[in-house]
Structure formats: C-alpha cells, structure tokens
Amino acid sequence: MFSAIVLIGLELPALLVLSCLFLLRAHSAWRDRLKLAGLLCAALFGVCQLAIKAFQALPSALLLVSIVAMLIGKGLIYTTTRRDSTWTIEGLTLAIHLGVLLLVVQIADHFSATLPRGGFTDDVMRQLALPQELFGRVQPDSAWAQPWWIVLAGAAYFSLCALSRYAMAPETPTR
C-alpha cells in the first residue's frame, strides 16, 4: 500500500525529469540548455529526496523495487524515443500524462465529499502501519489524508495514462 502511495507521489517529479530530457534534446541554444540542465538537476533531486524520505519512513524491499522499476520505465521511454525518433508522439503522451496528473491533484485538492472507506477499517489501517510522520502533516479534512482516496486517484491516473498510450500507439500491421 505504501509503495503505491509513494509511486503516485514520485510520478510528478519523474515526469518533470522526463520532460526536461525531452526539452534538452529540442533546444540548441546553450542558455536554454543550461536552464534546462538546472531544472533537470532540481527534478532529479526531488525524485531522490522523496524516495529517500519514503524509504526512511518505511524501509521495504518492495518500495525500493517499485521506485527502481518506475525510474527504469521512464528511462526506457526516453531511450526508445531517442532510438525510434518518436519525439512528437511521446511528447504529446507526456503532456497528456502531466495534464491528467494535475487534474487528479486538482480534483483531490477541492474534493469535499467523504469517500467510502472501501474495506479500510481501523484494523486494516493498523495492519498497514502507514508512517504517521508523512500522513500526520496532511490536514485531516484533506482527501490526501485518506489512503483509500490516494489509491483511487492513482488507479484513475495510471488507467488514463494507459488509455492515452494505447490511443496514441502507432498502428501495427496484423498478420
């Protein structure tokens, strides 16, 4: 559960890192490249900082594996795009992913209805042992204080990303 929550939190800085890599390739002026390199370093620092804090809060091999898998996935997107020269399609897909993520965050920020706990009883919450140092900082009336909302938001985000990737995939010939 905590790994899923952390992946949702790491998705924005990881997308920013990927965006910086795409933009670095597109710009040729040294000033633009220098600015983007600074932004890339800041985004990478954000990814590393969030991953370290999450691992300190709840050390887990599963958390480490999921973070590394996410970063490898973003790296594979960049390297296959570079190899296949599909910058336009991948750039559009990346823009859609950023838009969907910001939409999910915006909806959650203004979400006032109480979601059903969906099986997250008090006993289950104790068994999950989510670190209070991370969840204790969130205002209790915020949707982000409810782990079931975070899982729902993550499922919606990753489902919409998969649909956008499927919709923008080039047609493959059938045999």
Image (cartoon, rainbow, N blue to C red):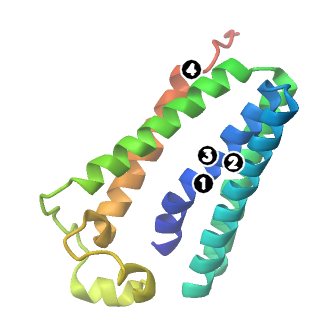
Mark 3–mark 2 CB contact (< 8 Å)? yes
Q: Dot 2: few (<14), some (14–19), or many (≥20) neighbours within 10 Å?
A: many
Task: Tell me the mark number nearer the camera, choosing from 3 and 4.
Answer: 3
What is the x, y in percent for residue 98? 51, 39
Most extreme residue toward the front is 31
Q: Residue at x 67, y 79 (%)?
A: 61
Mark 2–mark 1 CB contact (< 8 Å)? yes
Mark 1 lies on residue = 13
The secondary structure type at the circle numbered 1 is helix
Calculate the distance from the C-alpha at mark 3 to the C-alpha at mark 2.
5 Å
For badge 1, the amino acid type reads Pro
Disc marking residue 97: none
Mark 4 lies on residue = 168
From where the camera sits, is residue 58 visible? no
Q: Dot 1: few (<14), some (14–19), or many (≥20) neighbours within 10 Å?
A: some
Disc marking residue 17: 2
Calculate the distance from the C-alpha at mark 2 to the C-alpha at mark 4.
21 Å
Q: Dot 3: few (<14), some (14–19), or many (≥20) neighbours within 10 Å?
A: many
Calculate the distance from the C-alpha at mark 4 to the C-alpha at mark 1.
23 Å
For badge 4, the amino acid type reads Met
Q: In which quadrant is the C terminus drawn?
A: top right
Q: Quadrant of residue 151?
A: bottom left
The secondary structure type at the circle numbered 3 is helix
Q: Residue at x 75, y 42 (%)?
A: 35
Mark 3 lies on residue = 15
Calculate the distance from the C-alpha at mark 3 to the C-alpha at mark 4.
18 Å
Q: Height in image: 102 above or below 1?
A: above
What is the x, y in percent for residue 143? 25, 64
